[in-house]
Amino acid sequence: MQGIMKNSPRKEKNWGKVKFNEPYKKATERFRKDVLTRTDFDPTTLFQFSIFMAKSLLQMLEDVEENFGLEGQKVCNESLIKVGRDMADQMFGGLPIPTGMSIIELVSFIATQINTVSWTSVEDPHIINDQRCEFDILWCPLEDEYTPFDCRIQRYLVQGILDRVREMYPAGDFDIEFKSTIPQGAKTCKFVIARKQKGAPDKWKLYSELLEKRALKRWKAKQEANKNNE
């Protein structure tokens, strides 16, 4: 499998000049020191733990939506956005930007950190021009467990990251949208990041809102079916 993971090199010269922050640094350092060095440590257990937690979060969102509707959904989504904002603060807060680095490089580099660190994914990044960059996710740890609709969990975490990054780096006001996903049967999860037009709505938020409505329709239909079967 080609692509890059955490701390892998990129072809752009400025990539090596940016010193990104390590999120959850205290816990990470302890893990490296006390657990990763153990001869009896099997890294697949950490992967299995992440799947366990991801499916728990998904189940909680689905149950809250089914039982509490729009208000419950809103609480869950806002919680995920808060966690995303915290992740952005830890990774990108106070980040020194090398002199002369273009904004599209900064945006693309931040995306790589999000993909390879936050999601532990294998990424293939591309800078197209000064207005657009893309990336393909070649492997995601949730691709065999989440359905395409389940991936909305990540959308709200990403929304929090995007909101906070835009606050920290106003020049990086770019739209992001997906073109294909692995759970839908595509070879890769393909995303495009492009300069946002002034006054234009946020494409990421718009699609998230569409998914919210679909989720509530699903649960309403399920409840109606249950009543009819009683």
Image (cartoon, rainbow, N blue to C red):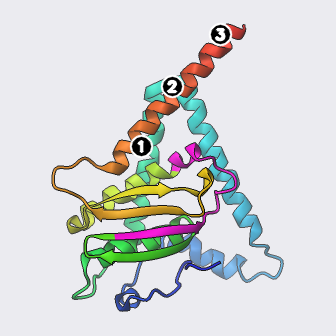
Could you tell me if the residues under marks 3 and 2 are in contact, i.e. CB atoms within 8 Å?
A: no
The residue sitting at 70% across, 64% down in the picture is 47
Specify few, some or many for label 3: CA neighbours under 10 Å numbering under 14, 14-19, or 20 or more.
Answer: few
Counting other residues with Cα less than 10 Å from the Cα at mark 2, is it few (<14), some (14-19), or many (20 or more)?
Answer: some
- Residue 12: in magenta span: no
Disc 1 marks which amino acid? Ser
Image position of 87 (left or right of 1): left
Which residue is at 60% across, 80% downward? 2
Q: Which residues are magenta?
A: 133-153
Q: Residue at x 39, y 38 (%)?
A: 209
Q: Is residue 143 left or right of residue 193?
A: right
Q: Gap in Å between the C-alphas at discs 1 and 3?
A: 29 Å
Residue 72 image point, x, y percent: 48, 30
Quadrant of the image occupied by residue 137:
bottom right
Task: Identify the disc placed on residue 227.
Answer: 3
For the residues labelled 1 and 2, the Cα–Cα distance comes to: 14 Å
| Residue 135 colored in magenta in the image | yes
Give the spatial CA distance, label 3 vs label 2. 15 Å
Q: Which residue is identified by label 1?
A: 208
Per the image, label 2 sits on a secondary structure element best described as: helix
| Residue of label 2 | 217
